[in-house]
Image (tube, coloured by chain):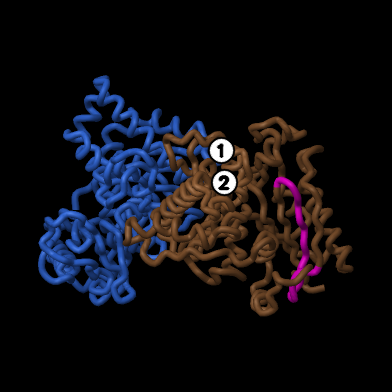
Chain colours: A brown, B blue
């Protein structure tokens, strides 16, 4: 078989892992399993490799045909023997604030074990990977100055400046959901901060504070229930201030917003969010666009594929809108 | 004469402009003049060119020998006919909040007129240029993930991530001094924001609020005058929170801090600033260094030179510590 006749994609989250394989025509097979939480520290990486092999078996293609693997993973990352590992608090018990994970992992290896199996390995955190997906197939194709932001259970960012996807010293750029925004709020984030953006508006933290689901709060707000409306307007304002902070730091041209909150309520929230951008520092904010993400639930898979797929496959995938077909 | 036998440097501020020329051995001549504030919109650019020529005359070298010019300028920038112009509120009356500038300039051309005279032109805002200087000659030589920040009359940043100096859609990255940090402070910034980092701690805004110079406040704080001490500790805390916000966004490894406040009080402020970094998000903040800028008052000149000087000159300038000699 030719080199890179197949590429693999891994989507590693706190709850589940998805492994997919694809060829020039698009995805061929996809398997998902719960994220392992016990065993030796290399359990997660070993399961990822086994799942890629299972996807090959399912598609009836030889396992050796996978030449490159892209990974979209929950962060943050840390170094293990000079390569990227995971220090994610929802996988590694040694990083978690609570004691409900049945392991004491501090950092688990990822890049190392994958490189032993595959010639090319690329790893990005989930929001950076989503940005790669949206730049390759979605809302910001080819845009040099753009930011992906998810408003969902958490708040995360991926940055592209001057056409460069930003990584940082350990691949951990984009954790701007943990920017401190309020000095007086007692809203508590999973990271321990009070008053960071994620504490103030993420789905998890809003629900913790309000004792009801974020979806219920936003639905009530849109039905003009006053208390819910005040909460939602407040959240929109914080989100807008967060985007403004990023725009003045990075001179961004386009924000691509994904995640469940924006997917369901983005059109309704947009004018409130825009107000925080449009009334400040015109030299930087004039003309800044806010657009919805396009790739939906498959953004992680396609971001992982896009990191490693041959450039000559891209146009065909775009024309076939490969993300609209079941693997 | 050989190509690039001379390079020019411009330092454009709200009060004065400095123009220097240099060859392989270091700076040769430097002239300064007040920044013009009246006339046609191209007055500033024409004066810059005349000053570079005057520096040549002063050094006894032909004006045509300047092949490349680097610029360190007060921002923000805006586009003029597809090239960079200045929209600085302390130069352009059309951008200023107050009415004390005798012009109605909204954007003045800079890159265009310079390109008509010089084969190579590079323009960075003053903090980005300072970062280039510190990466080339100063505290962070060769460091791929570093941030310059000045704590002075204003607060400004320059970002380097993965070895790339960041510019953004109009060259305006680094305006993170205008990040919103406090939702309850009524501290007012020149940009109109309340509670942004610059409003809270810049020399200009602290002095406006307190009715005495920032230098006096910090001196009193170090003499344990309780009210001054509370103000200085508060400022250190805000500065630390600002660095933290940048670090989680960009996964920075080193902060280089310049500006008059840090130059005089940095050692005393450092432990208070570090506390805000060291108690949060260890996966991103562990090992982050904060170091003082090294190039002092000539950082703008050397940043401007460093943008355009031939790479083969760099080592010689380093060995001679060219910034320690009068041009």
Q: Whole-percent x and y of residue A116?
A: 77, 53
Q: Taking the image as drawn, is residue A114 in sight?
A: yes
Would you identify the image quadrant in which residue A130 lies? bottom right
Q: Which residues are magenta?
A: A14-28
Q: Is A321 situated left or right of B164 in this image?
A: right
- Establish if B279 lies above or below A315: above
Residue at (32, 65) in percent of width and height: B122
Percent coordinates x, y for residue A303 in the rendering: 65, 62
Front residue of B195 and B318: B195
Q: Residue at x 58, y 64 (%)?
A: A293
The image quadrant where one finds the N terminus of chain A is bottom right
| Residue B2 visible to the viewer | no
**Which SS class for mark 1?**
loop
Circle 1 packing at 10 Å, graded few (<14), some (14-19), many (20+), is: many
Q: Nearer the viewer, residue A176 or B29?
A: A176
Coordinates of residue B186 in the picture (x, y in percent): 29, 40
Badge number at residue A189: 1
- Residue B257 is left or right of residue B326, and the answer is right
Eye-nearest disc, 1 or 2: 2
Residue at left offset 65%, top offset 63%: A296
Q: Residues within 10 Å of mark 2 (few under 14, many from 20)?
A: many
The residue identified by callout 2 is A202
Which residue occupies 20% across, 57% down?
B96
Q: What secondary structure is the stretch in magenta mostly built from?
A: strand
Q: Which numbered marker is on residue A149?
A: none
């Amino acid at each position: 078989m030719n080199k890179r006749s197949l590429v693999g994609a891994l989507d590693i989250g706190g709850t589940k892992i998805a492994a997919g394989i694809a060829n020039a025509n698009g995805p061929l097979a996809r398997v998902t399993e719960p994220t392992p939480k016990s065993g030796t520290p290399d359990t997660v990486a070993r399961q990822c490799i086994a799942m890629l092999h299972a996807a090959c078996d399912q598609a009836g293609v030889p396992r050796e045909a996978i030449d490159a693997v892209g990974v979209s993973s929950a962060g943050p990352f840390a170094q293990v023997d000079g390569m990227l590992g995971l220090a994610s608090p929802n996988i590694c018990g040694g990083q978690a604030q609570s004691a409900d994970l049945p392991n004491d992992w501090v950092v688990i290896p990822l890049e190392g074990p994958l490189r032993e199996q595959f010639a090319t390995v690329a790893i990005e955190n989930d929001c950076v990977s989503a940005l790669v997906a949206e730049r390759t197939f979605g809302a910001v194709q080819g845009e040099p100055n753009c930011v992906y932001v998810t408003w969902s259970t958490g708040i995360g960012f991926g940055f592209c400046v001057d056409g460069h996807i930003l990584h940082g010293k350990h691949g951990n750029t984009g954790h701007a959901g943990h920017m401190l925004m309020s000095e007086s709020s007692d809203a508590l984030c999973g990271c321990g901060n009070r008053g960071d953006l994620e504490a103030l508006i993420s789905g998890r933290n809003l629900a913790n504070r309000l004792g009801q689901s974020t979806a219920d709060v936003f639905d009530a707000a849109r039905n003009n229930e006053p208390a819910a409306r005040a909460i939602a307007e407040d959240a929109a304002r914080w989100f807008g201030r967060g985007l403004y902070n990023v725009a003045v730091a990075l001179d961004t041209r386009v924000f691509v917003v994904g995640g469940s909150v924006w997917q369901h309520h983005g059109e309704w929230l947009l004018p409130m969010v825009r107000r925080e951008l449009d009334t400040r520092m015109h030299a930087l904010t004039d003309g800044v666009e806010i657009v919805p993400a396009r790739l939906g639930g498959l953004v992680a898979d396609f971001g992982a594929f896009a990191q490693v797929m041959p450039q000559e496959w891209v146009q065909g995938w775009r024309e076939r809108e490969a993300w609209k077909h079941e693997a």
